[in-house]
Amino acid sequence: MALPNVRDREEARRALTAWLAGKLDGAGDVRLSELGGPASNGFSNETLIFDASWTDHDAAHRRSFVVRVQPTSHTVFPSDTLELQHRVMTQLGAHTDVPVPATRWFERDPAVLGAPFLVMDRTDGVAPSDNPPYTIEGWLTDAAPDLQQRLWRSGLDAMAAVHLVDWRAVGLEGTPVQGPAERLEWWADLLAWAAEDRPQPVPEAAVAWLRANVPESDAPDALCWGDSRIGNQLFVDGNVTAILDWEMVHVGDPRHDLGWYIWLDRHFAEGIGGPRLPGFDSYEDTIARWEQRTGRRADALQWFQVLSGLGFAAVMVRLCRLLVEFDMFPADTDFEHTNPACTLLATELERLGAR
């Protein structure tokens, strides 16, 4: 679900045209197409997509760009990580085979678009849709089971490649380090911030269960993507072309990513009352494949799935408030307690005897 656009697109196009002309030294006749944006996925960043054309030494150039703007009219997370996201993608693109968009510039000056922003090349590919859910309708639902399987495995393998990165060697020192206990408290703090003193019985019960069952691990920390799901990947013929949305990137236990990858697929299947796609590997085979790719054990994954359920429920609490602010939901809505993310988490906690 994407929040409504509140920016004057034509005004932004003029500002970006002048800004890009300054970045392309010696370029002439810089022109931008109308600004577009994704319609079905994402609500934590404003994304602008456009084609740019220019001349340089009498040669004509054309390229497609993506701009991600630091949120101003809405914020899903209490602190912004846009510059960190740019650095992570830049370093991964320069030093690894992890598929990320090619980054171009990071603009700190808010005078251009009212907030800092980053610019990337547009990458070929399409992401499975959040709205409508990819399990209900759309190109992935209609795809043959062998393509579905290839996509699921390619997405998992790309995530595993992130976990194999020597994050120090590629220049990612300074990335937040959060082990399981620290990541839990990060989510608990976000829930409290999003709830604004409104009771949240289900995610609060999850916090209590998670605190009582924090797993131990002596495995080394790894780079964690954070928002690890196929809806944040681009695919061509079932093969990953780019990993997107690094808002939750951190260094920690990569079982966090595996748990999130599985939990979000569960959300789009049992969470909304539908079946999984027939071509997707079972979760048992998915876990085994990740273990084989990374050389790590995925024990205690139940804990990381509940952590993912807490995280997604906390995000939905915040999103519900934003939807009210944008007059998309009535002020007295109870959606923050009844949304599928919350009900799936409640079901899991009941199964564990935690409610």
Image (cartoon, rainbow, N blue to C red):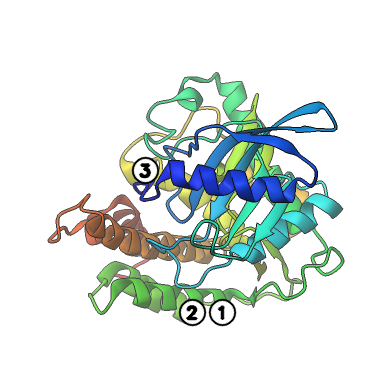
Which residue is label 1 attached to?
182
Is disc 2 surrounded by few (<14), some (14 to 19) or many (20+) residues within 10 Å? some
Q: Is residue 34 left or right of residue 336?
A: right
Q: Nearer the viewer, residue 61 or 209?
A: 61
Tag 3: amino acid: Glu
Q: Is residue 143 left or right of residue 355?
A: right
Is disc 3 surrounded by few (<14), some (14 to 19) or many (20+) residues within 10 Å? few
Q: Nearer the viewer, residue 232 or 18?
A: 18
Which residue is label 3 attached to?
270
How far from the left and from the top, in percent, is residue 74? 38, 61
Would you say residue 101 is visible in this rendering?
A: yes
SS type, badge 1: helix
What residue lies at 75% left-to-right and 50% top-to-bottom? Answer: 161
Name the disc covering residue 309, or none.
none
- 20 to 241, vertically: above or below: below
Mark 3 and mark 1 lie on one chain; the one further toward the N terminus is 1
Which mark is nearer the camera, 3 or 1?
1
Tag 2: amino acid: Glu
Which residue is label 2 attached to?
185
Q: Is residue 202 left or right of residue 106?
A: left
SS type, badge 3: helix
What residue lies at 58% left-to-right and 74% top-to-bottom? Answer: 180
Q: Are marks 2 and 1 in contact (CB under 8 Å)?
A: yes
How far from the left and from the top, in percent, is residue 48? 52, 44
- How far apart in space, not on screen, are marks 2 and 1 (Cα)? 5 Å
- 212 to 347, vertically: above or below: below
Tag 1: amino acid: Glu
